[in-house]
Amino acid sequence: MRALWWSVIATVVLAACGRVDSELVSKPVVLNMQQKETPAAFMPPVEVPLHSAPMVEDVQADRADVNVRRYLAVSHSIELEVKAAEQVETTLSDLTKGVMQANGEILSSRFERNDRVNPSATLAFRLLPATVEPFFARIRGQGVIVSQGTESEDKTAEVVDVDAKLKNLTESRDRMRKLLAEKPGKLADIVELEKALTETQSELDSIVGRRKVLAKQTDMVRMTLEIHATRSIAERSAWMPLKDAWESSGFVFFSSLGHLLSALIALVPWAIPVGVLVWWAKRRWAKRKARAAAQ
């Protein structure tokens, strides 16, 4: 009976211990992070998985790549047709003034007129991106755009490289200037440092010029405009090739005569040796023929 009683007591004690352990395991631990009296030294460390840091770096790198500015050199080529030949020159003048009014840059301008074809003009210029569309409207008001093309060249890598060189050379120049100003040394060292400073400044000036060229190419839009008049019926006639051939017949004849005369003059130095060789060959043949007849 006593043994049975002790076994019942042991069972109750073990059950109570298991209940306490299960409660400790299942009950979540709640930390009040807003308690100011808890010292920082007793705050539990936050464990971060090892793979999370590279993932954050990759995401930041991707965002950086997305946010990098692209430098594009955009160019447009336009062919404009006006109604009359007299409008070509006036259109060229009007559009040139329009470029200047839009704070653009004229690269080249050419006007051509002769008797055989209608006049034509070419205008190359650069505009700020915000003024491109209004200028297109101005071109359409002058005539009909018969062809139009757009090209884009990515200059990002070149611009980034030039900017990096510009930064490094500027820092190097400033360091050398500071050394010359604060730490004078031996005369040979000063001469060598001034020589290196001159070379660095020369290279820096070259890089600055290159950066300005790239800035014009990427910050502005290049446009090339060709202007010509609508072709007349006479120009489209099937007899035009015959007319052109007749008009150029005199030039072709005398050109051919000139080539023939040049060929004859070129053969004069060879006439004497060739003549002597032919005379010697004939004489030898005659002697051989006479000798054969005597036998």
Image (tube, rainbow, N blue to C red):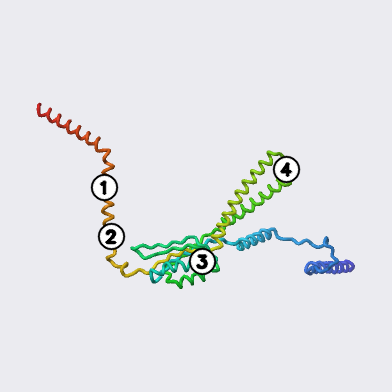
Residue 67 visible in the shown view: yes
Residue 96 spot, x, y in % from top left: 48, 66
Q: CA distance from mark 4 to mark 2?
A: 81 Å
Q: CA distance from mark 1 to mark 4?
A: 79 Å
Q: Quadrant of residue 237?
A: bottom left
Is tag 1's residue or tag 4's residue first in the polypeptide sequence? 4
Q: Which mark is residue 260?
A: 1
The three-letter code of the residue at mark 3 reads Val
Horizontal side of 214 relative to 149 (left or right) equals: right
Residue shown at 27% from the left, 41% from the top = 267
Residue 14 spot, x, y in % from top left: 83, 66
Q: Label 2 belongs to which residue?
A: 247
- Decide: is 187 above or below 36: above
Residue 131 spot, x, y in % from top left: 54, 69
Q: Secondary structure at mark 3?
A: helix
Question: Seen from this angle, which residue lies furthest right?
Answer: 2
Q: Label 3 belongs to which residue?
A: 99
Nearer the observer, 240 or 91: 91
The three-letter code of the residue at mark 2 reads Glu
Is tag 4's residue or tag 3's residue first in the polypeptide sequence? 3
Proximity of marks 4 and 3: CB atoms separated by less than 8 Å: no
Residue shown at 26% from the left, 56% from the top = 250
Residue 227 spot, x, y in % from top left: 42, 66
Is tag 3's residue or tag 1's residue first in the polypeptide sequence? 3
Q: Label 4 belongs to which residue?
A: 184
- Decide: is 197 above or below 83: above
Proximity of marks 1 and 4: CB atoms separated by less than 8 Å: no
Label 4 or label 2, whichever lies nearer to me, is 2
Q: CA distance from mark 3 to mark 1?
A: 53 Å
Q: Which mark is residue 71?
A: none
Q: Secondary structure at mark 4?
A: loop
Is tag 4's residue or tag 2's residue first in the polypeptide sequence? 4
